[in-house]
Amino acid sequence: MRYSEELIEEIRARNDIVDVIGEHVKLRRTGGSYVGLCPFHAEKTPSFSVSPDRQLYYCFGCHAAGNVITFEMQYQNAGFLEAVQMLADRAGIELPKQEFTKEAKEKEDRRELFLEAYRAAAAYYIYKLGTPQGKTGLQYLKSRGLSDETIKRFGLGYAGKYSDELYQYLKKKKNFDDRILADSGLFTYNEKYGFSDRFWNRVMFPICDVRGRVIGFGGRVMGDGKPKYLNSPESELFNKRLNLFGLQIARAHGREKMFLCEGYMDAISLHQAGIENAVASLGTALTPQQARLLSRYTKEVYLMYDSDGAGVNAAVRAVPILMEAGLGTRIVDLRPHKDPDEFIKTLGKEVLEERIRNAENGFLFTIRQLSTEFDLRDPEGKTRFERAAAARLATFADELERNNYTEAVCRHYRIQPEAMKRLIGRIAAEGTQAERYREPKSGIRKKSEDGTKVTQKRMLSFLAGYPDAYEASAGLVGPEDFFDPMCRRIADLLYEQLRNGGAMEARLLNSFSELEEQKEAAAVLEGRIEAADQAALDRAFTDTVIKLMKQSNAMHMDAWNGDMDELSRLMEKKALIERFEGEGKVLHVAFRER
């Protein structure tokens, strides 16, 4: 499917990038731009810049970049067309019905078949739960205190005792092709035995996306089989790091706060008790993507993790992830019971609500857990604790927030506030220095980008960022000098726009429908040319033009096909380069950005 360039541009233009990003990221104005903490990677110091004039964003930390459509694609984990649809809805623009291209139609049809397979599987599991064969599963759910209404609301079901029941149903009754079933994640395949159901003899918990579409399953085995819990594998539909169980229901009830649990049954029990803003992670530790997902629907997260050692450690790890996503955090004390499900069954909803009202601040919880690692009665132990606490307090970018937490920690642990603030300042300064020279976490340096491509990208950044770079380099370089495929595409579009009276970089990105292409193009257009003064900027610009001319001429010379007229043009270009260098000419661009 492809909408016209004019329609896409109208949708982009009617969704101001500052307004759209500001709905998800706290931005503050600095000069002609807005800055904030990047929503695409964890950071303590804002490096995410949004330009209202150019309608672009750029992160100096992770190099995420693009226009408002790119942002929706990245932030919402959406495809190009889905992002356009969301922005059209936001702007009140009705999209016309379009025909799919062959490639896009095949991709969309494949995705729809996967969704249909999961819908059919979910319906089959529900059906099986109500049959005599599903009695074991139904008894288990009833023994966990679930009502018929709750079982129905969450679409709980049962996978039969035989390992090919679902396959036979989808293959013979629903006529699904083996190629779709093989890639769906619902089955395993063995050359000797063929297809086998991934889930059998299990109570089934459908996992839905925020729209309520089934994209995966979790299954709890009946009896002593292993593993006890089994989730769908990663697939074209399902990524456990990007989704949360129960969010399709909870998002409508959690504007102020949501409750985050470790297990499906915990979240379901909370919903049955009338606490409908509860979700659960999907068998893994909380991820930054899940935290950002929560931040779209709520302001504060109450952690209801298991009260054992593993649950406490998981909560300690989750708190900073949630805080980095801009969420307030609180910890609900479930002791002496292990989890929310057990707590509700034993003490009831009223007592749980009291615990919720008295929930502990998430950051102060992490400090309290930290204090258990030291002997605070010993001066050396207390000093080591104070230094460790100071390191965590130094992570607050906002001075007011940092000071408030510092005072709370000092008051509770009887620490001199001024001494602690000085220590925090030293740690923050050391951290800034260390950040400048930090190696990649893997310890392996990334291979440097090809030098010729660096020069091409640098030239495009000059053209996009400086008003007179186009005129200053006219006659020296043009689109034909950019031979990297991506750079050439950008150059063709950018030069066309420059010839027509000025660069419209945000609009240019509409020509790229793939997210990675948009990100790369935006990073080039939003690239910064660092220079100490006007003279340094002129030297950098001149050097870039000369390098591009040389590289282009060499590349065309290597590709020469024997055409004497072409050879003559190449020799003239070579002479121009030599004359340009010999005369020591310096090109000039105004020391300012558009």
Image (cartoon, helix red, strand yellow):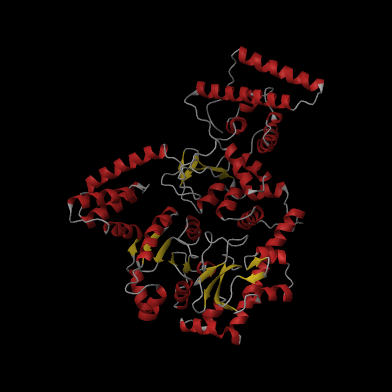
Q: Quadrant of the N terminus?
A: bottom right
Which of the 4 quarters of the picture holds residue 473? top right
Q: Position of residue 112 (x, y in %)?
A: 69, 64
In this orientation, which residue lies closer to the viewer: 249 or 102? 102
* Point 77% across, 18% down: residue: 568
Q: Is residue 152 at all visible to an observer of this figure? A: yes
Q: Position of residue 480 (x, y in %)?
A: 71, 30
Q: Is residue 406 left or right of residue 555?
A: left
Tally of numbered discs: 0
Q: Position of residue 434 (x, y in %)?
A: 38, 39
* Point 35% across, 60% down: residue: 362
* Point 68% across, 35% down: residue: 488
Farthest residue in the front direction? 192
Farthest residue in the top direction? 583
* Point 39% across, 72% down: residue: 339
Q: Position of residue 366 (x, y in %)?
A: 33, 58
